[in-house]
Amino acid sequence: MADTIFALASGAGRAGVAVVRLSGPQAGMALTALAGTLPPARTAMLRNVAHAGAVLDQALLLWFPAPASFTGEDVAELHLHGGRAVRAAVFDSLMALGLRPAEPGEFSRRAVENGKLDLTRAEAIADLVDAETEAQRRQALRQYDGALADLYESWRAQLIMTLGRAEAAIDFSDDGVGDAEFDASRQAAVHLSEEIRAHLDDAGRGEALREGVRLAIIGPPNAGKSSLLNALARRDVAIVSDIAGTTRDVIEARLDLGGVLVIAADTAGLRASRDAIEAEGVRRALARAKDAHLTLLLLDANAAGEAAAIPGDLKPDLVVWNKTDLKAHDGISISLKTGAGVPAMLKLLQQKVQQKFAGFDPSWAPALTRPRHRAALVEALAALDHAGSAAEPELLAEDLRLAMRAVGRITGRVDVEEVLEFIFRDFCIGK
């Protein structure tokens, strides 16, 4: 029998209301012990919560008997006043009744194990909780509604049917049926591989929306990179100084540009240096630029010759000239000192970000959102490509099984145990 668990399902800290969630076979017993009787199913009731003869709080109680609950188990909720002392007293009482605190993601994991969620929807819950921008919210909600699960389960269903035809080619090889079924199975494998390949060919847009578009701000020392990062973040993130080489490491700020999360990085000034620490900063700056989705090269309008020192293999998406209050310059010109040109530059930067997602609407197009999905589909694609050129029905059937297992691992329909721990380890407590 599974343990009965509890956790704070609302935000930590002082609040008007704190929601404590219970799940497991002893949830009803615990709620009865604290409140006297169970409320009617799915009906909120106001009751005194007491333990060992002492009233702890007055709370709204909810009761969700299995299997009609989030986890598929008996679930109860206590909507308490949000003070720390109230929560601590209720937690102590629940532990005294034999319940234990939940591990991160344990409620969602139980929902998966009890067939209430597939793995992609469980991951979407974590993404909804972590969503910082409108695009992230829409993408996570689309995934929670089952867009990815429906797509992958449709492929899995096709693989099951195709595998059945391949098995028929083996079983009826002497009845004149085998050759036709063999050819049809190979054609189906080729068609499905084309669909998966098109799905994979997305330039990582779904993952970029979920994790954030990486923007690297590069340029020579004293061009104003740290000032630009502060201007974008609208707060003092990086130290600004006239001393060249002040920035030694990569400094990041999270921005919302047009509903898209952008992780902007201020980097060390690009120049040759005998200082080992500064040289390491330059190396990290170049590495960040290489790894970024977008690169902004910031140059000093008063030192135009410094542009020649920028490595030729760097191909910035945006070149901006700063300090144009001191000297005019053609092109995208700003003055971080006066603010001139910054709104126009910000609008252009936002357009560059949006171009990364041209033709991609996360509210309707199911997108790959995690490396786990991509790795499984790459594995399935390799098996299907092999199946399309299989010389024997037995080899074709084995390739189809490998592809089916790889796709099934995404939603958790097969081999679920090996991925559960990886998926739920980063969930917040209470989910």
Image (cartoon, grey):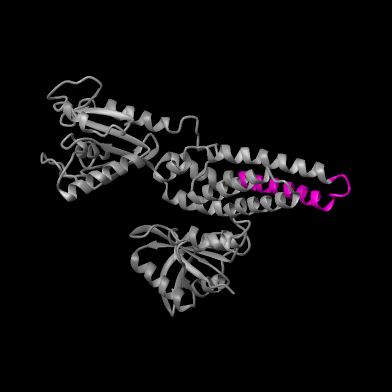
Report the front residue among 264 and 72: 264
> Where is residue 184 shown, x and y percent of the image?
76, 41
Q: In which quarter of the image is residue 74?
A: bottom right
Chief SS of the magenta region: helix
**Farthest bottom residue?**
52
Q: Residue 141 vs residue 89: left or right?
A: right
In this view, 334 is above or below 197: above
Residue in the picture at 55% in, 62% down: 418
> Where is residue 416 shown, x and y percent of the image?
58, 60
Instruction: Examine the structure image and report whether residue 166 is included in the region drawn in magenta.
Output: yes
- Over which residues does the magenta segment extend? 151-177
> Where is residue 408 shown, x and y percent of the image?
62, 53
Q: Quadrant of residue 240?
A: top left
- For the question of whether residue 71 can be seen, the reply is no
Residue in the picture at 60% in, 60% down: 415
Report the front residue among 98 and 46: 98
In this view, 97 is above or below 374: below
In which quadrant of the rendered image does the N terminus lie?
bottom right
Instruction: Examine the structure image and report whether residue 72 is included in the region drawn in magenta.
Output: no
Q: Residue 315 vs residue 10: left or right?
A: left
> Where is residue 350 shown, x and y percent of the image?
35, 31
Report the front residue among 254 and 287: 287
Residue in the picture at 14% in, 24% down: 325
- For the question of whether residue 95 can be seen, the reply is yes
Residue in the picture at 40% in, 58% down: 17
In this view, 292 is above or below 86: above
